[in-house]
Image (cartoon, helix red, strand yellow):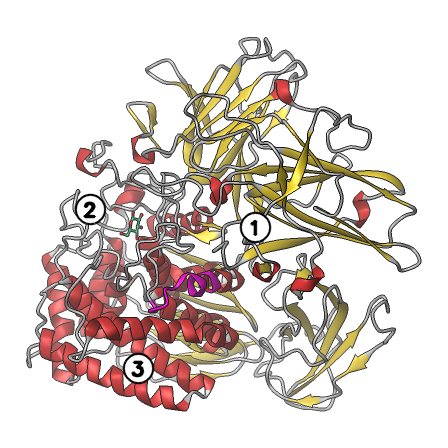
Amino acid sequence: MSGAGLFETVRSPNFTHMQPTLTVEHRRADDLVGLGEASPRLTWATATDEPGWHPTAHEIEVTDPDGLDSGATAWTTGRVESDETVLVPWPAAPLGSRQRRTVRVRVWGPAGDTPSDWSPPVTFETGLLDPADWTARFVAPAVEEAPGTAGDPIAPSPYLRTEVDLAGVPRRARLYVTALGVYDLEINGQPVGDHVLAPGWSSYEHRLRYETHDVTHLLRPGRNALGAVLGEGWYRGHLGFDGGKRDIYGDRLALLAQLEVVDAEGATHTFATGDDGSWRAGPGPIVRSGIYAGETHDARREPPGWSSPGFDAAKWGPVEVVDSDRDPATLVARVGPPVRRTEELRPAAITTSPQGRTVVDFGQNLVGRLRITLPADPGPAGAAITLRHAEILLDGDLCTEPLRLAEATDRYVIGEASGGATWEPRFTFHGFRYAEVDGWPASTPLTADDLVAVVTHSDMERTGWFECSDDRVNRLHDNVVWGMRGNFLDVPTDCPQRDERLGWTGDIQVFAPTGSFLYDATGFLASWLADLAADQGANGVVPFVVPDCLRFGLGASAWGDAATVVPWVLWERAGDKGVLAAQYRSMTAWVEFVLAQAGDDLLWDDGFQFGDWLDPHAPAGNPFDGRTDPHLVANAYLCRSLDIVAATAVLLGEDADAVRYRRLAGDARVAFVDEYVTPAGRLASDSQTAYALALRFDLLPQPAQRDRAGRRLAELVERAQHTIATGFVGTPLVSDALCDSGEVGAAYRLLLQDRCPSWLYPVTMGATTVWERWDGLRPDGSLDPGAMRMNSFNHYALGAVGDWLHRRVAGLAPDEPGYRRLRIAPVVDPDPAVRDEGGLTWASARHRTPYGMAESSWRIDGDTFELTVVVPPGTTATVVLPFGGDGAAGDPIDVGSGTHRWTVDLPAKDSS
Ligand code: BGC
């Protein structure tokens, strides 16, 4: 009965009320204080079970929840005929600083008569939008303590405090705060907020993020104490490889804090650093702290009660206003989510190593730090507990060589009152699965109850999931998720453990699509892109790392193309045209830089390139030296970026630019073909990466050339026996290029290979994150000595395959920006023999789009193939079944919102 198919739209038995849910900009529902936008955009997703539902109109109501600002009550847009629901422009007058608004929305569907219920109301508040709002000035200890050890550049972390008097219970209190360095705050002995390593790392000279904390509940009538601890963080601490540098942004740690208290009568009282002599600075227990170094906490130096009123700070010294180039104009509100503690993992095992050391295994390579709880009898004051961290073990002991100069060592020096104390370092983080604990009090052996690994990263909302019938692939996908968690710690980093942890542009350029599926990373990446633009050279060059602490002044393709690709990904995946508008000058500046390198012949064929970095063919010590001509990569990326800026110019109404960049994209293709492609479609580099680039970036004008390239790619994949033969550039493209060329079987064999180098080889070696090198650990568990200096076990770049798993294997892809239209076209291994021998028999992906949850799940059961698709309200989908009536891919089917299911017969085995 080949060809017989069944289609049903699955109706929910319980029809729920139609109700939208509202979000503001890219903020989570619990993070709506301190917005930097005067006209924040609104998004709403509507829950309804009505199949084929789409919005036709909406009404937005805006109220001033406390009437402090205008006394106005409700204001509404009235019914607006519009089907827009994502990042809809602010409908009311632009807001000023410190203004609160409560917003709700209701919508009309296709019938157009009865509105939905109102969304639950959402209240948000703006931060300080005008530099003139800042009366606070940066203050630093007039004299900082010297480092404890001669020759050690790291000085103890200063503690700062003041006290303020309040006449009554505040109606509202806000603390606007940032630092040169990193900071932690306390009021009346209580922590302010739950952020970690604030204000994070940005291009500080241009953009220093401040935070707005609601501190109303922490203040009380009478005397209140306000305390801050400062750490070196990225501002003054050691950054970079090959020795790196210190003091990159400045050499003085300083605090900027402005406490604004609205009293019961509505009058505002402001207490700001620098406005009087009340702030004092003194010593604290953190005697050494660095991002790479780790932290030493000497509990004997703890000043009990330092952040409570009445503490005797007589011996503390004065602070002074710092002459700073941190003009208030550089202060910006946070755009992405804060860094938080997101999960705690207990030890999976505590063992004694062959060398007699205590080694704790958390069962998962992660990023964060340890929290220890000391026994009641912790032993003599002055003794130290040392915590060392590593991603792997070698012969049963920590292998720290891949950390290079990162000491990654925390120490707790026992004080008189340490019995039962709990301690976690404040201003550092480590990438580790294993920890060595030394000096644990002899009175009580270390148990799993005494320590916990605190997972720490930017607290983005999870939005994407994938699963399939092969557990090894599921573990690979988990590893991709953990790789993202570890490397989205305020800045998208290459790796989180060694003396690097930098915002390498190439890595995020390839990973952004995967990351945007797994988490709502739009705010995080939009903020980083603002840093990218700020750090761009006057000639448009994009630094290798953002924030640019290396300052090489060089540009390289596939890395610098983050300037065009990442904004485009946010447009495609989140529907955020505002990011394109904000980045437009940066995007065009980058392509102009490349065009200037390319010259009249439109070929960038000299100078530095990373090329197909870490092609497994390259010698361990020379990752540049892959199979693909680095300038072929550069010119392919020039075409790709010109396409993106041309399309962006069209969207933004930059008509003259659109014409120019489209023409240049055409000319650059001609130049590429002349230089690198034979008329028959053979490429100058006969490598998988070269063919994948040519196919995915649409560089081959003739259909015959494309066919030839697709076949050659499949031949090369076959010849490599389905092991990986591509680096950072080719690996994210090769599977898609194979599928586009009808070589689905080859793509699956590449995915399911577990011999080194392959995606699954690390999984067979017990990997719990994505590795930098395919052969990070060799089959016998050893490390290649030649690769020791660059062998990270938590590098998300090669996890970019996640995007292909989501879009092609499960088949859940955006067809219009923000998934307003979905393309559901799962690829299924066409060879029944392969499926019978362990190929995938089902796969499923879910993604919370801006419109609501979308899903694509397929399953082969006996002789039938079943596909279930959830299309969110307000969206439509094009569905392409992998098997149609005659065994070939079916025709596109259009469906509206709802849950739809297709059941078709598999092609008869002999017909394939
Ligand atoms: C980083 C990479 C980065 C590369 C560029 C490495 O040290 O870890 O991921 O993209 O340098 O060459």
Sort mark 2 into few (<14), some (14-19) or many (20+) by Cα contacts within 10 Å. Answer: some
Residue type pointed to by label 2? Arg
Q: Look at the image and say whether residue 536 sits in the magenta stretch.
A: yes
> Where does the image place residue 781, in percent across and percent down from the top left?
24, 32
Residue 661 part of the magenta-drawn span: no
Q: Is disc 3 placed on a helix, strand or loop?
A: loop
Q: Which element carries disc 1, helix, strand or loop? A: loop
Residue 53 appears in the rendering: yes
x, y percent for residue 702: 15, 85
- Rendered position, 724 above or below 674: above
The residue carrying mark 2 is 755
Q: Nearer the viewer, residue 45 or 721?
A: 45
Q: Is label 2 in a helix, a strand or a loop?
A: loop
Amino acid under label 1?
A: Ser
Instruction: Name the residue beneath numbered marker 3.
Output: 885
Q: Is residue 1 visible?
A: no
Left or right side of 312 for 548: left
Q: Nearer the viewer, residue 459 or 578?
A: 578
740 or 484: which is nearer to us?
A: 484
Q: Earlier in the sequence, mark 3 or mark 2?
A: 2
Q: Which residue is mark 1?
A: 324
Which is more foreground, mark 1 or mark 3?
Answer: 1
Q: Residue at x 27, y 54 (%)?
A: 838
Q: Which residues are magenta?
A: 530-540
Q: Earlier in the sequence, mark 1 or mark 2?
A: 1
Q: Quadrant of residue 668?
A: bottom left
Distance CA(mark 1)–CA(mark 2): 56 Å
The reply to whether callout 1 and callout 2 are in contact (CB within 8 Å) is no
Nearest to N terminus: mark 1 or mark 3 = 1
Give the position of the C terminus as an image quadrant. bottom left
Measured in 3D between alpha carbons, the distance from the residue under mark 1 to the one under mark 3, in whole angstroms, is 71 Å
Mark 3 packing: few (<14 Cα in 10 Å), some, or many (20+)? some
